[in-house]
Amino acid sequence: MTEVWTGFQTMTADECRRLLTATDIGRVAISAGALPFVLPVQYTLRDDHLLLRTPGHHEVSDGIDGQVVGFEADTIDLDHGVGWCVSVTGTVRVVPDAVTVEPVHRWFSDGVVLALSTDVIVGHRVAV
């Protein structure tokens, strides 16, 4: 880890991948109609990809295959002043067999499944 400024440390890619297994809800940022659009997703880490399940049938699946998107997951404990944030940037592909990621939360029961490469992964720990 490298301390960027007091209380804010950059993590290694391996630590980022480990922390991504600590939660299952994140956000994906895409471009829709030339505008930024952020959508909550359920996710799981599989090898060198994140599998993202969107909520419901959403226009996010239209034309997204092959796009470069952003993803972020975090855990912040405001009472204790600690937490982490991991961001991933990569190419996303629509997974045609949506049963590969079972929905954990009812909001995602009929969503689209996307596979996101984790080639560019950055994370930070916060302690104040």
Image (tube, grey):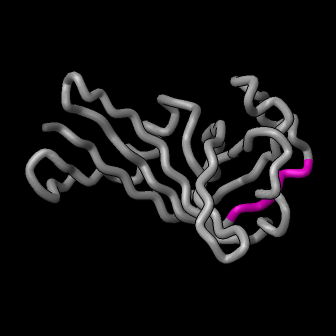
Q: Could you tell me which residue is drawn at 81 percent across and 30 percent down?
A: 109
Residue 51, horizontal then vertical, whole percent: 69, 45
Tell me which corner region of the image, top left, top right, bottom left or bottom right, holds residue 122.
bottom left
Residue 94 is inside the magenta segment: yes
Question: Image check: 106 left or right of 4?
Answer: right
Q: How many marks?
A: 0
Query: Toward the viewer: 21 or 38?
Result: 38
Residue 31, horizontal then vertical, whole percent: 65, 69
Extreme right residue here?
97
Question: Image check: 46 left or right of 10?
Answer: right
Please give the range of residues in magenta: 92-96
Q: Could you tell me which residue is drawn at 51 percent across and 57 percent down?
A: 88
Q: Could you tell me which residue is drawn at 49 percent across and 39 percent down?
A: 20
Residue 33, horizontal then vertical, whole percent: 72, 73
Check the image and report above or below for 82 versus 8: above
Tell me which corner region of the image, top left, top right, bottom left or bottom right, holds residue 34.
bottom right
Question: Image check: 84 left or right of 2?
Answer: right
Extreme bottom residue here?
34
Q: Could you tell me which residue is drawn at 74 percent across and 39 percent down?
A: 55
Extreme left residue here?
6
Residue 77 is inside the magenta segment: no
Tell me which corner region of the image, top left, top right, bottom left or bottom right, holds residue 46.
top right
Residue 4, horizontal then vertical, whole percent: 16, 59
Which quadrant does the C terminus fall into?
A: top left
Q: Main secondary structure of the magenta part?
A: strand
Check the image and report above or below for 48 versus 36: above
